[in-house]
Image: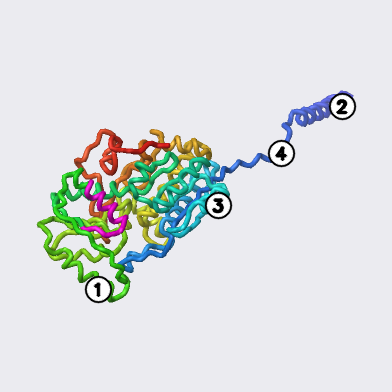
Amino acid sequence: MTSAVPGTLAAFLCLFSLTVNVTDAPAQETTAKPEKKITEIKIGYLRAYAPQLTLSLLDLPPRDEGVAGANVAIGDNNTTGKFTNQKFSLDVTEIKPEAGAVQAFNDLIAKGDRYVVADLPARQLLSIADIARDKGVLIFNVGATDDSLREDDCRINIFHVAPTRSMLADALAQYLVVKKWSNWVLLYGSHEQDHLYADALRRAAARFGGQIVAEKEFKDTGTARRTDTGATQIQQQISVFTQDMPEHDVLLVADESEVFGTYVPYRTWTPRLVAGTAGLVASSWHPASEQWGGIQMQSRFLKTTGRRMLSRDMSAWTAVRAIGEATTRTNGDDPKKISDYIRSDDFSVAAFKGQKLTFRKWNLQLRQPILLGDTKSVVSTSPQQGYLHQVSELDTLGVDQPETKCVLK
């Protein structure tokens, strides 16, 4: 009898313990965790394209020039987007350079694109500028170098990533003056874009102390530039064309239309350096650039595309990365907030040029160093040492705030 009591008590305690454990056990979750919401950021790429005629087969632009840079940047944005719950995509639309751009632009907007990378000439870009503003769309200009787009025709919704002609000319002029090669002869083509670059070179000469001792226009007579007879004819003209020039250090060439400039080096009447659109060329990027981490960018681009990175590729890459940086920092996809942030003091974008780049508040032009190079290597980078500025040395290139005619609207 006495031995039964402990057994009964033990059984009771065991039963009580089980009851307590069952009662106090936390309830198992029966609902799955909600999936993270992904913000999709759609970027349009509107491009004016036509096969380009060049004097050298080596200068034929790649079919995907610009677009390739944007696609690489989309990949870079999505790498960060995995951690910020953002997904970036690119819609590419092509039109002819002489076609209207409005319908193609509206088609991109209909797809949900609120940011458009525009590789368009000035006329086409202006045709969509106000439509984009009214629809709350931001445009990033990566193709047009016209200063007028940043001055009299500036818009509050267009950010300019491509450098202006005045920035390119100033970069070249600074270097030539630093080298004390300050006496120049200016040769320019007969097309509108040639005249605009010639104007930029004249402005740069006056600004930095260069002396243009003579000028001469090369008339485009419609010669078949890519036939044996046409090429030979132009080459033979160069020596006579550059005869009887006053003493000078450098021949400046303004031939954006690709009529004669390639044939100027080594064919002049007197042996002289050549710079401008031929010889020593100012550009926003160079395929041989490897400073400031550039070799990493070059290698990644080559692996992705199978070719070297060109200036337009870098401009498009920078534009898409600017969008990615702004959407990440603002944690959203509101074009108004994105625009405000990009124009603020907090924004900058790294682009393998030795310093972080920002947009000028007075005309929304991207501040950036300009590379000077020949066909093989980077010769120098402007701004040159010694050119100082109260805000940024980069503002010694192009139209500075006290000079601007831009009223953003």
Compared with 207, 253 (above or below) is below
Q: Who is closer to the viewer here, 40 or 258? A: 258
Disc 2 vs disc 4: Cβ atoms closer than 8 Å? Answer: no
Q: Quadrant of residue 225?
A: bottom left
- Name the residue tied to disc 1: 232
Measure the C-alpha gap from mark 3 to mark 1. Answer: 46 Å
Q: Nearer the viewer, mark 2 or mark 3?
A: 3
Few, some or many residues within 10 Å of mark 4 (<14, 14–19, 20+): few
Q: Nearer the viewer, mark 2 or mark 4?
A: 4
Disc 3 vs disc 4: Cβ atoms closer than 8 Å? Answer: no
Q: Nearer the viewer, mark 3 or mark 4?
A: 3
- Name the residue tied to disc 2: 4
Q: Residue at x 12, y 56 (%)?
A: 248
Residue 336 covered by magenta stretch? no
What is the three-letter code of the residue carrying label 3?
Asp
Q: Residue at x 45, y 53 (%)?
A: 72
- Name the residue tied to disc 4: 31
- Name the residue tied to disc 3: 107
What is the three-letter code of the residue carrying label 1?
Thr
Few, some or many residues within 10 Å of mark 3 (<14, 14–19, 20+): few
Residue 48 percent coordinates (x, y): 44, 57
What is the three-letter code of the residue carrying label 2?
Ala
Mark closer to the chain start, 2 or 4: 2
Mark closer to the chain start, 2 or 1: 2
